[in-house]
Image (cartoon, helix red, strand yellow):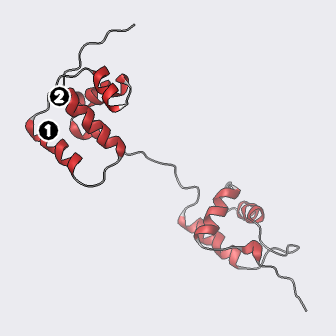
């Protein structure tokens, strides 16, 4: 079994007040509240294992919270860094072209636009190097377009 050195966290009074205000006021993500509680309990001299048992966290998570506080400060201990997210598959001009294409008549030999046909046509017209059906579906949904429901069949 590993033995760890006691994690000593000293919270200056301004940080302690900020944590208490955060816990008293308004809605906060659960993650932030648990981290704030962990810091306050670590500052009272409790071990990481004790704090973990009190808050239903793992001792490793408590040590990481305390370590981030000691190395990078209160803000970094409470909040995650922003994540970059995925790059959009289509830029604004590509989206506009596809929406305009869907608003027009389907190609010769087809009665209606399908998501698969739209993706094939966008690649065929060299607007995008490749595009998936799900990307097209989400684009059409955001513009409230349902071309597969419209047919170009003449009825009596």
* Circle number at residue 16: 1
Q: Residue at x 55, y 62 (%)?
A: 91
Residue denoted by label 2: 43
From the viewer's perspective, tell me whether residue 6 is left or right of residue 52. left
Q: Quadrant of the C terminus?
A: bottom right
Q: Quadrant of the N terminus?
A: top left
Rendering coords of residue 107 (x, y %): 81, 73
**Is residue 156 at all visible to an observer of this figure?**
yes
Q: Are marks 1 and 2 in contact (CB under 8 Å)?
A: yes
Residue that lies at the very extreme toward the top in this rendered image? 1
Q: Residue at x 21, y 35 (%)?
A: 73
Instruction: Give above or below for 26 relative to 39.
Output: below
Residue in the foreground of this view, choosing between 49 and 100: 49
Q: Residue at x 21, y 38 (%)?
A: 74
Residue that lies at the very extreme toward the bottom in this rendered image? 156
Q: Which image quarter: residue 145?
A: bottom right
Residue that lies at the very extreme toward the left in this rendered image? 13
**Is residue 81 at all visible to an observer of this figure?**
no
Rendering coords of residue 120 (x, y %): 76, 61
Crowding at mark 1 (Cα within 10 Å: few <14, some 14-19, many 20+): some
């Amino acid at each position: 079994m590993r033995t760890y050195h006691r994690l000593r966290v000293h919270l200056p009074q301004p940080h302690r007040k900020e944590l208490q205000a955060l816990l008293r006021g308004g809605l906060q993500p659960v993650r932030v509240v648990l981290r704030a509680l962990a810091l306050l309990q670590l500052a009272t001299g409790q071990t990481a294992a004790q704090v973990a048992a009190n808050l239903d966290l793992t001792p490793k998570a408590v040590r990481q919270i305390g370590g981030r506080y000691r190395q990078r400060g209160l803000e970094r201990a409470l909040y995650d860094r922003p994540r970059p997210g995925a790059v959009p598959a289509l830029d604004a001009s590509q989206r506009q072209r596809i929406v305009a294409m869907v608003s027009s008549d389907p190609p010769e030999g087809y009665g209606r636009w399908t998501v698969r046909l739209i993706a094939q046509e966008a690649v065929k017209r060299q607007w995008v190097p490749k595009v998936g059906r799900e990307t097209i579906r989400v684009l059409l949904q955001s513009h409230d377009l349902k071309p597969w429901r419209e047919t170009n069949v003449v009825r009596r």
